[in-house]
Amino acid sequence: MPPGPPTRPIVGNEHLIPKSNAHFIFTEWAKKYGGIYTLKRFTNTTFVISDPHMLKELLDRKSSLYSHRPDSYVGRLITQGDHLLLMQYGDEWRRIRKLIHQYFMEPMCEKQHIHLQNAEATQLMYDFLVTPQDHMEHPKRYSNSITNSLVFGIRTKTIRDRYLTRLFSLLNEWSEILEFGATPPVDSFPLLKLVPEILLGRWKSRAIGVGELMTGLYTEVLGQVRRRRESGLNRGSFMDRVLDQNEKNPLTPSQLQFLGGVLMEGGSDTSSSLILAMVRAMIEFPDVQKKAQEEIDAAIGEGRSPTWEDFPQLPYINMMIKESHRWRPVSPLGVSHAVAEDDWVGGYHIPKGSTVVLNVWGMHHNEQRWEKPEDFMPDRFSTHPKLASQYTSDGPPATILATARAVASEKRAETIKREFLEATKVFANYD
């Protein structure tokens, strides 16, 4: 197996892994032990991948082996196994993914979604202008409103919206309890489930509490859709379409709730994080903002606001979006994978049942691949100005494009357009 940090009896490397921001130490270990290394976490063996070529091999050529998820007792307590990020690879997983792809790929986006995105991007600019003190909250409203409108037919009008505030509070608690070391190693030592939880930080009550918050929010939002439909109003949202098909393609009540909820999570958090990363970058690197504004002024002028049709004339904006994903990836360690069968990667044996962690942060901040990785430099992608999905090479600039799970959202037409409109409207209207 690959090398790794020295271990201790029983705990392995668990004592070395921080409960937050583990991607920093994982990246330091990658410099010492290489693009793939081993961590022992009690009885679990974890392999950390920091090499984009290995990542591409695992997720493209060997996807059937690496699409599974590690078994998580805490995850099941929270989600009953119906959350797409924790769901095991199989027929149900493929069926739900197919439902999502049918609605959020290019044709549907061109017909229906783009007008909504334009309107919400304009609202975002207005919000920044009128209440700049809430600049950290406006991107959350913007991304949540687009997502909820598309998924549920429910708009988020203000930053005080009850669904919005509950969602981001939930996401914070959800991410905290799933951090490395945040709960006892019950998957390695099942008998720990029998130990009074007061001795172990009330981990079970915390997990159940997060699950109740999650189920409560998703049930309430879906219930609003159902009541609207009962009154004869079908807005053609994603969940409207799913409910229309549910007699022929039935999902359980829990699956229906989590289907909409997962989309609400991902769409709300990813886009808002990208906007905030770009705003931070513009503060730290004003020359980049100046160049972006000059490109927009030259291509569009001052008479109108940018639209998706301007995409071909604004290659620097597209480079900025790619660089934002590289500079501050939304999910620095991606989502953990489980190995379905024994395998060999990079000359190393990967046993069945092992956990694989994708060190996205390490790939994106590798000094051997990226000059000054902590600097925000969109020109890294000057030779790759097209959409990420149009490239198949795996040279240095394309590693950002090949980091499949971290930037998978960029391949969906709806998200590509959303990010482009976010960037262009911000830079066209504000210095």
Image (cartoon, rainbow, N blue to C red):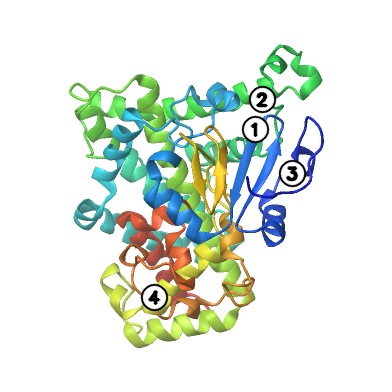
Q: Position of residue 117 (x, y in %)?
A: 33, 57
- Mark 4 or mark 2: which is in front? 2
Q: Amino acid at mark 3?
A: Ile
Q: Is residue 280 above or below residue 341?
A: below
What's the distance in space between the residues labelled 4 and 1, CA to CA?
40 Å
- Mark 1 or mark 3: which is in front? 1
Residue wearing tag 1: 44
Few, some or many residues within 10 Å of mark 2 (<14, 14–19, 20+): few
Residue wearing tag 4: 384
Lower position in the chain sequence, tag 1 or tag 3 = 3
Few, some or many residues within 10 Å of mark 1 (<14, 14–19, 20+): some
Residue at figure coordinates x 46%, y 75% from the top left: 427
Q: Is residue 80 above or below residue 40?
A: above
Lower position in the chain sequence, tag 2 or tag 3 = 3
Q: Amino acid at mark 2?
A: Ser
- Mark 4 or mark 1: which is in front? 1
Residue at figure coordinates x 50%, y 26% from the top left: 79
Quadrant in the rendering for residue 197: top right
What's the distance in space between the residues labelled 1 and 3, CA to CA?
14 Å
Q: Amino acid at mark 4?
A: His
Q: Are marks 2 and 1 in contact (CB under 8 Å)?
A: yes
Q: Are marks 4 and 2 in contact (CB under 8 Å)?
A: no
Q: Position of residue 298 (x, y in %)?
A: 36, 88
Q: Quadrant of the N terminus?
A: top right
Residue wearing tag 3: 17
What's the distance in space between the residues labelled 2 and 3, CA to CA?
16 Å
Residue wearing tag 2: 188
Lower position in the chain sequence, tag 3 or tag 4 = 3
